[in-house]
Image: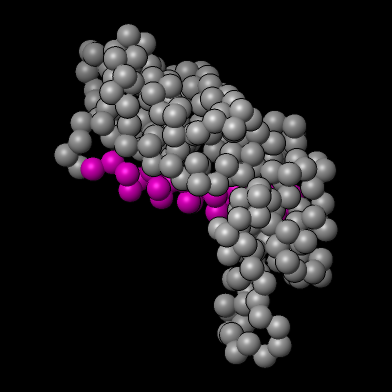
């Protein structure tokens, strides 16, 4: 979904043709559910978790409130389903990025590039999953924290073992996740290209494992 209602967003949220369209019930069901998830991202990106209503989500998805409640009992349930699908999408892009013959640092750079490339195409994902959750509280904030920490772990996966390498602690993982979120939020807030954050994120992910000096040197190659 694009905030300016561009072609990509229109395609994702397009309405089904009216009348007897000949589509299977399974296809219609999947299409409507996916539109509601896309509508959830659009509504939250625009209004925030607390302010976005079922009406806002349904309107963005191009379906009725009745249709919304046939899939989700509450807007919170829709939000969590959106997180689940978003997480699947992000982790699929990351896991496909690194190549077998790459070094670990090259793999980290490749995974970060894939993540930023995906988010660059749709900054509303950052607004939904990074910027808006802290103000939501409850299960949404917890889900956001879990997603970010697992994301950091996935970006730095496969680190070598030995005297030159350290295993990040839970505290370091949480701190890196918070720093990553801050970088992404600042970029989107400033309207800057997300892909330009690659060196900074590479250094963030590598530092707990190989130290700041070596991480900074590796980041310069991004």
In magenta, the rendered stretch is 76-99
Q: Where residue 102 sits in the image (x, y, percent)?
A: 20, 36
Q: In which quarter of the image is the C terminus?
A: top left
Q: Position of residue 54 (x, y in %)?
A: 81, 56
User: Looking at the picture, does residue 155 appear above or below residue 16?
Assistant: above
Could you tell me which residue is drawn at 34 percent across and 14 percent down?
Answer: 216
155 is higher (above) or lower (below) than 202:
below
Q: Is 65 situated above or below 100?
A: below
Residue at point 36% right, 30% down? 156
| The image quarter in which residue 11 lies | bottom right
- The furthest residue to the top: 213
Q: Which of 213 and 76 is in front in this view?
A: 213
Residue 72 horizontal side relative to residue 95, left or right: right
Magenta-drawn stretch, dominant element (helix, strand or loop): helix
Residue at screen point 20% across, 31% down: 103
Q: Which of 177 and 131 is in front in this view?
A: 131
Is the residue 148 above or below the residue 82 in the image? Answer: above
Q: Residue at image x 56%, y 35%? A: 146
Q: Is 116 a magenta residue? A: no
Q: Quadrant of residue 13?
A: bottom right
Compared across the picture, whether 205 is left or right of 43 comes to left
Q: Residue 165 appears at what percent x and percent y?
A: 27, 17
Find out whether residue 94 is within the magenta segment: yes
């Amino acid at each position: 979904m694009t905030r300016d209602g561009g072609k990509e967003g229109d395609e994702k949220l397009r309405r089904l043709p009216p009348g007897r369209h000949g589509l299977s019930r399974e296809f219609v069901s999947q299409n409507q559910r996916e539109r509601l998830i896309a509508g959830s991202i659009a509504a939250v990106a625009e209004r925030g978790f607390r302010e976005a209503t079922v009406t806002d989500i349904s309107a963005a998805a191009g379906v009725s409130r009745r249709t919304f409640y046939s899939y989700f009992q509450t807007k919170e349930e829709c939000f969590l389903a959106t997180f689940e699908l978003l997480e699947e999408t992000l982790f699929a892009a990351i896991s496909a990025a690194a190549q077998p013959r790459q070094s670990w640092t090259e793999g980290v750079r490749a995974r970060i590039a894939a993540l930023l490339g995906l988010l660059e195409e749709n900054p509303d994902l950052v607004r939904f999953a990074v910027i808006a959750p802290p103000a939501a509280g409850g299960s949404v904030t917890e889900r956001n924290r879990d997603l970010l920490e697992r994301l950091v772990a996935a970006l730095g996966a496969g680190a070598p073992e030995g005297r030159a390498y350290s295993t990040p602690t839970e505290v370091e993982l949480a701190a890196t996740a918070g720093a990553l979120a801050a970088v992404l939020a600042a970029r989107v807030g400033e309207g800057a290209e997300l892909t330009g954050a690659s060196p900074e994120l590479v250094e963030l992910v590598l530092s707990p494992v190989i130290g700041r000096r070596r991480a900074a040197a590796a980041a310069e190659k991004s």
